[in-house]
Structure formats: structure tokens, C-alpha cells
């Protein structure tokens, strides 16, 4: 895979406090990358350094294989900040046109792309409206359009689903997948773990300015699995079916059983045990931890763990 962005040893201080403390990672082209952590973890400061709004006190950023330069590389980036930045009194059409031209598009190119997105999102009637006339969800759709209208190769979305109803959230989600499939790279920043589990290929977790977890979603879940299994039977479970040294019973519900396999045994041992008992197994599934559970476990040994759990 081609690496589009490399972050090496980034540090940022405010009034002597470390907002970002020696963070490094890389992002492949066409991936949907999750930057996760509680409020105050350093996510937004990190994103602002990637976009050139802040300069790092230490470390460096490489984009497309070259050291990042704000004036040159800004046109390759689309940034949707958590604090929305649209002009409330300006007409929507004029505003999107102005922002698209700021990113280097000619007026003709900008109008063509704006028409495409306005039709796609059913926004044709919005041209002469003002941002202050829009609902929060409508403003969010507009903000997304201004972020991607110039076809950036790196799209940074900070809490993009905030304020969106389920229908519009799915529309934005589908566009994220489509843009990534077409080669754009997405950085998706949030503290909502269930969204990350559904959308992201690779994640980095930061807490108190430090990177504390880095990897693909699948590998992280495999690394933190606890040998938990759910088994479904044709008939209700009786006590004599669970009195066994192979596993520890975590939960019993009629014809379903959740167990934790004891060390030294395999799932085949469990299956054979129930076969020997004359039970017909209808389903046998490994239970992987959610990202929410994993992150709470990871940060329990770090400062601020209690606040992280509250934020979730």
C-alpha cells in the first residue's frame, strides 16, 4: 500500500502543558483511518498540525512523500472541523463557490463540482439561502460539501455525524466509503466507538496527548479477545451440562450459553464435550470485545481513565 501521510514524533505545548506528546503513525492511501480518544486527548490539536493551522514544536509531517508545506499542500486537504466555520449571513451558493476557489478551482470547475454535490444531496434549492436559515443537520451536510468539493486526496472529518439524523448520517457514511474506494484517504476523528467499528480500517487511540493504541480494527479485536464463546442449543441447558473443568460459565439463558474457555483447552474440546452429552449444537460463535470495551481496558492504567469512561 502507498503511504500518503506520515506523522513522526509530533509534540505540541501550550503554556508548558503537552497537548500532543511524541505521537507517530502513518496512513495508507484509500484507507479510512480513525483517530480516537476522549475530549481533551489531543485529537484536534493533532489535526490542526496536520492541516498547517498549528506548527509542531517538535517532529515532522510528510504528505505524499514530501515534508508538509502549508501553502503548497493545503489544496490537497479537505478539513471539516468539529467547530463549524461557515459564514452565517452569506448566501450558501456564493459561500461554497468562494471556498472552492480558495482551494484552487477555477470558477467554471467550482460551479460544475458544486452542481454535482448539490444535486447529489438534494440541495439545489439552497443556493440563495443563508446558513443561519438551516437546521443543524442541514448545516452539517453543507459543511461536508465544502470539505470535499475540491476533490482533496486527504479528507479530515472531526465528529462528522454530530447533529445528523440517521438517514443523513447514512448518506454521509456512504460518501465516506465511496470517496475512499475512489482513492481518497479519510481521517475520521471521534470519541464514538461504535461509529469507528463500522467505518474504519485502521485506528489510533490517544489519551492525555499520548498514543496508546495503534492497529487495524480486526487485529486489535483479536489481540484483546478473552476466549469467550456463545453456544446455542436446540433445548434448554441443564446444570449438569455446565459442571465441567473445560470452561467457566459467564451467562446462561434458556438454550444459550456464554462461556470462557479455560487455559489449555480449545473450542473443539468444548464441542466434543457437548456432543458426548448428547446435545445438538445449533450455533457456536466466538465473542470478540467491542472497541469500547477494549479502549476502557487500555486506558485504565493511564491517567484520566475515569474521565475517558465518562466521556464514552
Image (tube, grey):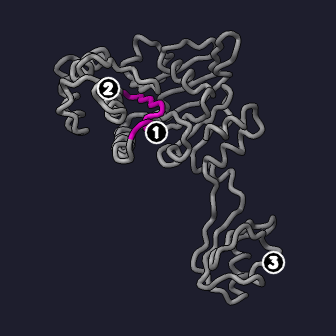
Q: Position of residue 33 (x, y in %)?
A: 50, 37
Image quadrant containing the C terminus: top right
Residue 81, by quadrant, is top left
Identify which residue is drawn at 72% across, 58% down: 226
Q: Earlier in the sequence, mark 1 or mark 3?
A: 1
Q: Position of residue 281 (x, y in %)?
A: 61, 81
- For this orientation, the residue located farthest to the bottom is 278
Query: On screen, 272 above or below 129?
Result: below
At mark 3, the secondary structure is loop
| Foreground label between 1 and 2 | 2
Query: On screen, 259 above or below 73?
Result: below
- Left/right placement of residue 222 relative to residue 239 reads left
The residue nearer to you, when weighing 180 against 188, is 188
Identify which residue is drawn at 35% across, 28% down: 143
Label 3 belongs to which residue? 244
- Left/right placement of residue 262 relative to residue 177 reads right
At mark 2, the secondary structure is helix
Specify whether residue 177 is painted magenta. no
Q: Position of residue 240 (x, y in %)?
A: 78, 84
- Left/right placement of residue 34 relative to residue 70 reads right
Magenta region, mostly helix, strand or loop? Answer: loop
Q: Which mark is residue 217?
A: none
The residue nearer to you, when weighing 214 against 42, is 42
Residue stretch in magenta: 150-164
Residue 124, by quadrant, is top left
The answer for how far apart the CA atoms under marks 3 and 2 are is 61 Å
Label 2 belongs to which residue? 146
Query: On screen, 68 above or below 151?
Result: above
Crowd band around label 3 with a 10 angstrom C-alpha radius: few (<14), some (14–19), many (20+): few
The answer for how far apart the CA atoms under marks 1 and 3 are is 45 Å
Q: Earlier in the sequence, mark 3 or mark 2?
A: 2
Label 1 belongs to which residue? 31
Amino acid at each position: 500500500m502507498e503511504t500518503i501521510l506520515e506523522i513522526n514524533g509530533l509534540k505540541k505545548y501550550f503554556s508548558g502543558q503537552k497537548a500532543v506528546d511524541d505521537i507517530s503513525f502513518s496512513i495508507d492511501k484509500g484507507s479510512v483511518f480513525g483517530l480516537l480518544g476522549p475530549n481533551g486527548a489531543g485529537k484536534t490539536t493533532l489535526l490542526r498540525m496536520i492541516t498547517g493551522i498549528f506548527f509542531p514544536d517538535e517532529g515532522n509531517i510528510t504528505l505524499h512523500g514530501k515534508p508538509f508545506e502549508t501553502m503548497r499542500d493545503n489544496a490537497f486537504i479537505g478539513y471539516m472541523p468539529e467547530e463549524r466555520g461557515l459564514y452565517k449571513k452569506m448566501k450558501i451558493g456564493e459561500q461554497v463557490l468562494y471556498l472552492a476557489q480558495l482551494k484552487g478551482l477555477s470558477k467554471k470547475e467550482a460551479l460544475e463540482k458544486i452542481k454535482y454535490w448539490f444535486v447529489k444531496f438534494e440541495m439545489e434549492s439552497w443556493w440563495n439561502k443563508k446558513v443561519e436559515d438551516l437546521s443543524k443537520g442541514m448545516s452539517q451536510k453543507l459543511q461536508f460539501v465544502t470539505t470535499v468539493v475540491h476533490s482533496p486526496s486527504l479528507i479530515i472529518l472531526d465528529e462528522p455525524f454530530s447533529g445528523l439524523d440517521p438517514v443523513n448520517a447514512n448518506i454521509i457514511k456512504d460518501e465516506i466509503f465511496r470517496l475512499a474506494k475512489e482513492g481518497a484517504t479519510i481521517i475520521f476523528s471521534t470519541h464514538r466507538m461504535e461509529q469507528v467499528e463500522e467505518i474504519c480500517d485502521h485506528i489510533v487511540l490517544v489519551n492525555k496527548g499520548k498514543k496508546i493504541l495503534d492497529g487495524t480494527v480486526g487485529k486489535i479485536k483479536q489481540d484483546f479477545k478473552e476466549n469467550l464463546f456463545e453456544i446455542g442449543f436446540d433445548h434448554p441447558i441443564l446444570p449438569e451440562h455446565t459442571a465441567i473443568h473445560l470452561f467457566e460459565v459467564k451467562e446462561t439463558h434458556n438454550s444459550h450459553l456464554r462461556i470462557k474457555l479455560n487455559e489449555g483447552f480449545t473450542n473443539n474440546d468444548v464441542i466434543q464435550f457437548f456432543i458426548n452429552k448428547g446435545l445438538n449444537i445449533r450455533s457456536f460463535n466466538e465473542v470478540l470485545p467491542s472497541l469500547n470495551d477494549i479502549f476502557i481496558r487500555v486506558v485504565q492504567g493511564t491517567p484520566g481513565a475515569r474521565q475517558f469512561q465518562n466521556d464514552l
